[in-house]
Image (tube, rainbow, N blue to C red):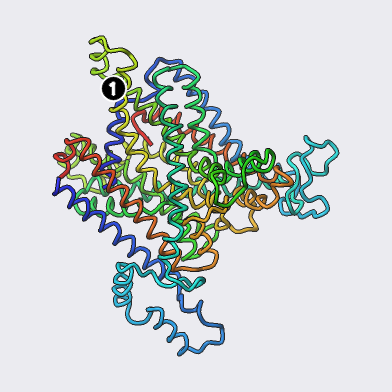
Amino acid sequence: MTRYLVRRLRLALIVLFSVLTMVFFLIRVSGDPALYFVDEFATPEEIERVREALGLSGPLHVQYLRFLRQTVAGDFGTSFRYGCPALRLVLERLPSSLELAAVALTLGVVIGLPLGIFAAVKRGSVYEILATVGAIIGVTMPKFWLGLLLIIVFAVELKLLPTSGRGSVQHLILPAFTLSATLTARLARLSRSSMLEVMGEEYMRTARAKGVRERWVIIRHALPNALIPVITMVSLSLPRLIGSMVVVETLFAWPGMGMLMIQSVYNRDYPVVLASVFFMSLVTTLVFLVTDLVYVILDPRIRYESR
Amino acid sequence: MKVDSEERLSLANASVHPGRTSAGGRFRIKACFGIVGALLVIGAALCAALAPRLAPCDPNKIDLANRLAPPTFMQGDSPGGLLGKDSLGRDILSRTIYGAQVSMLVGFVTVFISSIVGTGLGLVAGYKGGIADDIVMGVADIIYVVPFLVLIIAITALVGGGTLQLILYLGFANWISFARVVRGEALSIREKEYVLAARALGASDLRIMFRHILPNVFAPVIVIAALGAGSMILTESALSFLGLGVSPSIPSWGRMVSDARDYIKVSWWPAVFPGLAIMLVVLGINLFGDWLRDVLDPRLRI
């Protein structure tokens, strides 16, 4: 267990380090950030002074090491626009993004999972049709369009819910539902096929032969086995969820990390863009790490099968 | 790290395929869906190819006198045409037809690029193994933790945007799904007897990879490419919606929805029709891709 943990932690660190390196070279390709701080009449000496102040002087490898040292210390530079540390801006937006993501995840699980399970247990029923059609519509609808349709129906026509912003529970409903659509659809689809697979296993027949009631067979014998791939999928769909969050937050003017990132892109506020990209990658890396560890606890075989 | 969980996911699913669990009837229904999907895709491709002939007017012609004119099916004597006019009085039907061009271009070209890159890297990783495998799969893991849309936004913001650039970014960032599957197949094919035989006859690595392994991975690559085109079209439309996609002068569905956002309180049609177009095309691609998978490679889970 400890050895596995060490191996996984080392891997996560390598991934994060590589993301940082990728980010560093992306900035290098993007041209000279110093030029954003000076006007067009600046002399070369003035530009050089700005570059020095920004930590952009010296040979490339020196800059790279300095960049690594600063980011490890949590310093992503100062926001060009707001004049405060970029990481602090990102962290300030974290609670509202977490709130949205948590509600969307819950919605996805609460709607998608039972739909898929019922579709598998009662084949040919209305659940199966709902799950199949819903699954394909949920995957093919662009998030921004679904959100806009919901705004048109529930906010503009029916005037039931606010169009945008954050504050009350009412503000949360439309963005959370929009964000959860893909996850709901994919979960319904996967839990259905996973459940179908488990239902054909020998131990299901054994349980039934023992005279266990059908409901109990499904709850006790089928569900726990069917849920393993489902947990994997929820964790693996996190990058996708974060990506959609950028779009959904922008559409609903939800003041989270995604909207901050897009606004920083518009404002060419690179330190904030980088801090957000890094922070989002950090979150996914951590969630993947935790999922893998949960597996080790759930399924002892993994400890041996991993090299 | 992630590979571990993904492998478990595919292992858990390898033995089941919902389409095959019951007899031919289900399979025939799926074939019907596949045909509907193919028709939708062909329809969109025709719109893209024949846009100048099909569109009733110039997609960029501004007509401020008739801005936001409703579609004729809502109001018979409206000057709006079949689908109405947008906030600058441009014809929505014409713009939607022209919008197919960008989506089709992005969908197909990006998938073409990423299938070549991904198949190549996957072949090398799976066949050579060792350090090549570690590097390719390691890079795949790293790219995977950065959310795809966020990655593309960051590259566009830092390196610069434009239609061609966007296609290149999407094409080169999306190779992972191809590489994973091809690597897995190559790993198992490498051990087959005909590969051993070829090697015993003195065939070079390159020849084995291209003549003996590549033909065997075509089926999954085609399926992934078909389904991948849909998600590339969705990504392009999301980027255009955020104002980071193709140049504003080109009609694109994502940007049309984005332009319509400020006017939804007075008119819904500029927002609804381009979005519907995206959905129909992606739906068509997915239905067709699902059917293709059932026919070509039922074990594949994506």
Please report the residue visible at 36 percent of the width from the left and 44 percent of the height from the top: B178
Q: State which chain disc 1 sits on.
A: A
Query: Quadrant of the rendered structure where residue A109 is?
Result: top left
Please report the residue visible at 48 percent of the width from the left and 22 percent of the height from the top: A127
Residue at disc 1, secondary structure = helix
Question: Picture coordinates of residue B42 (x, y %)?
Answer: 58, 36
Q: What amino acid type should be assigned to the residue bearing mark 1? A: Arg
Query: Quadrant of the rendered structure where residue A105 is?
Result: top left
Q: Nearer the viewer, residue A16 or B114?
A: A16
Question: Picture coordinates of residue B108 (x, y %)?
Answer: 50, 45
Q: Nearer the viewer, residue B130 or B267?
A: B267
Which residue is disc 1 drawn over?
A220
Question: Picture coordinates of residue A247 (x, y %)?
Answer: 52, 51
Please report the residue visible at 14 percent of the width from the left and 48 percent of the height from the top: A2
Question: Picture coordinates of residue A163 (x, y %)?
Answer: 62, 47
Q: Nearer the viewer, residue B115 or B273?
A: B273
Instruction: Tell me the quadrant of the picture where the C terminus of chain B can be found.
Output: top left
The image shows a total of numbered marks equal to 1
Q: Is residue B134 left or right of residue A273?
A: left
Q: Is residue B81 left or right of residue A2?
A: right
Q: Is residue B236 left or right of residue A193?
A: right
Q: Is residue A274 left or right of residue B67?
A: left
Please report the residue visible at 55 percent of the width from the left and 51 percent of the height from the top: A166
Residue furthest right as drawn: B77
From this view, report whether residue A82 is shown above or below residue A215. Answer: below
Which class describes the residues within 10 Å of circle 1: few (<14), some (14-19), or many (20+)? few
